[in-house]
Image: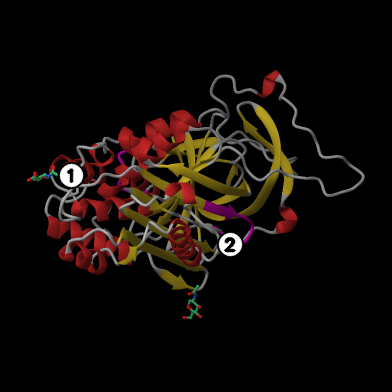
Amino acid sequence: MNLIPALLVITFQSVTNGQNQQPMSRLNFFDIDLLRYCAEERRGNVMVSPASIKATLAMLLEGSQGATEVEIRSALRLAPTKSEYREQLNLFLEGLKTNTTGVFLQNANSVFVSDKLKMKKDYESLLKSVYLADVFKMNFGDIDGSVNTINNWVSKKTNGLIPGIVEPVNVNPSTEILLANAMYFKGSWQKSFDPKETSGTCFYNHGVCNKVQMMSMRGQFKYAYSEELRAHAIDLPYEGGRYSMVLLVPIDRDGCAPLIRDLPYMSLNQIVNVLEPYDVQLTMPKFTIDYSEDMVGPLISMRISTLFASSSNLSGIFDGDSPYINSMYHKVHMTVDEQGTVAAAATAAMVVPLIEDGVQLRVDRPFVFFIRDNELRVVLFEGRIEEPTPFVDASPAKAPTPVAPPPAQMMPSGPPAPVAPLAPPSKPVPEPVTRKLVQRQ
Ligand SMILES: *[C@@H]1O[C@H](CO)[C@@H](O)[C@H](O)[C@H]1NC(C)=O
Ligand SMILES: *[C@@H]1O[C@H](CO)[C@@H](O)[C@H](O)[C@H]1NC(C)=O
């Protein structure tokens, strides 16, 4: 049995006005755990869609019983009763569809099931009504035909950005069920970056300067510095304000791994709630991510394990034998550029570094981002960026600058200044002033 959530996304940016209190926040622990286990598994850029993985797991949850059900439900932190969590999840899935000026979001679920199997009728109707999923009967004996059907579906739902998710090797005549989830997001920044301000500057990864495409702008953004996380947090809104990209930028150049490790102690909602409007000079890299991973490893780390073992109990899906899942492919594509791509009752003390009349934030080291629906308080995508888009000097006179190891003094030593200085300021930059934000209800 194969489970394949395909995920995809594209350009974006963010802001926030999340007043609505939906019962989604308990789902956020899942998001943080997922990012952590995915980021620990490999280097480089990592990106996952917790929303799409949740949607897929929820569909499996409905067909599962015994230990399998308990594991999925507790990893997702769902309400204990079926009627409650169905309502939660249905609301969640309905929220993953938007088409407004500046933001287009589409989430689609499909179940490709072998025509040799008898799917339970009530399971099938539940998939359609609660999980908004399409069910396709497949002849997996026709491998090429099956691969085409699945890949065409994914390609269509992702507007061509993910042309395919399965290869002939992933499908065989004994395949029983293949679940696919496709998500597409395209957002324009509320405040776009001026491409003329984009230049090639250092981004430090593992102490090495890589020349990357850095975008720059000055504007009002919601911002805070978290002492607990030793990181800056900034909210970049997409047009319309419902969706945002939230960046968490560690103050230490090699602070990304500890940041991700410490995140479970502070929810993204808490972070977003303490952000306050500041005049910010923001410099951040453009980046593109193509990420493809089998989610079985991270999910097993999150204690969803019987689903992937012969002890799996999916007896609510089929009459007869209970299958198990052998893979769960997750594929994501995203681009962040000039045009496009969260706070309050926290118990955390937040400190804001002030420079002149504003804040300077230079994202020149590995960082974490979240794309968030501020209304539903749901994380659509999350990731870690270590390798932004390289800068290639277009001028024929000069060769591209080779990557050079940084001089020793560039390595962080002791607590670094919370805010890196900008390129030559016209005025001297005063010492950062820090002040405590008062806790608010
Ligand atoms: C699945 O769990 C249910 C309820 O615990 C149990 O009755 C059933 O026998 C189990 N089926 C399989 C295949 O393990
Ligand atoms: C979004 O809605 C507009 C008008 O309602 C429509 O023209 C457009 O095709 C839609 N976009 C997508 C990608 O479906």
Local secondary structure at mark 2: loop
Give the residue displayed 69% in from the left and 31% down from the top.
209
Q: Residues within 10 Å of mark 2 (few under 14, many from 20)?
A: many
Mark 1 Cβ inside 8 Å of ligand 1: yes
Q: Tell me which segment is drawn in magenta.
A: 333-348
Percent across and percent down for residue 260 are: 43, 34
Residue 441 in view in this figure: no
Q: Residues within 10 Å of mark 1 (few under 14, many from 20)?
A: many
Q: Quadrant of residue 119?
A: bottom left
Residue 392 in view in this figure: yes
Of helix, strand and loop, which mostly describes the magenta segment? loop
Magenta highlight on residue 265: no
Give the residue displayed 15% in from the left and 58% down from the top.
84
Q: What number is the disc on residue 313?
A: 1
Q: Nearer the viewer, residue 432 or 141?
A: 141
Q: Are marks 2 and 1 in contact (CB under 8 Å)?
A: no
Q: Nearer the viewer, residue 50 or 309?
A: 309
**Does label 2 or label 1 sit earlier along the sequence?**
2
Outermost right residue: 397
List the residue tagged with mark 2.
191
- Identify residue type, mark 1: Asn
Q: Is residue 268 left or right of residue 291?
A: left
Give the residue displayed 17% in from the left and 61% down from the top.
120
Nearest-to-viewer mark from 2 and 1: 1
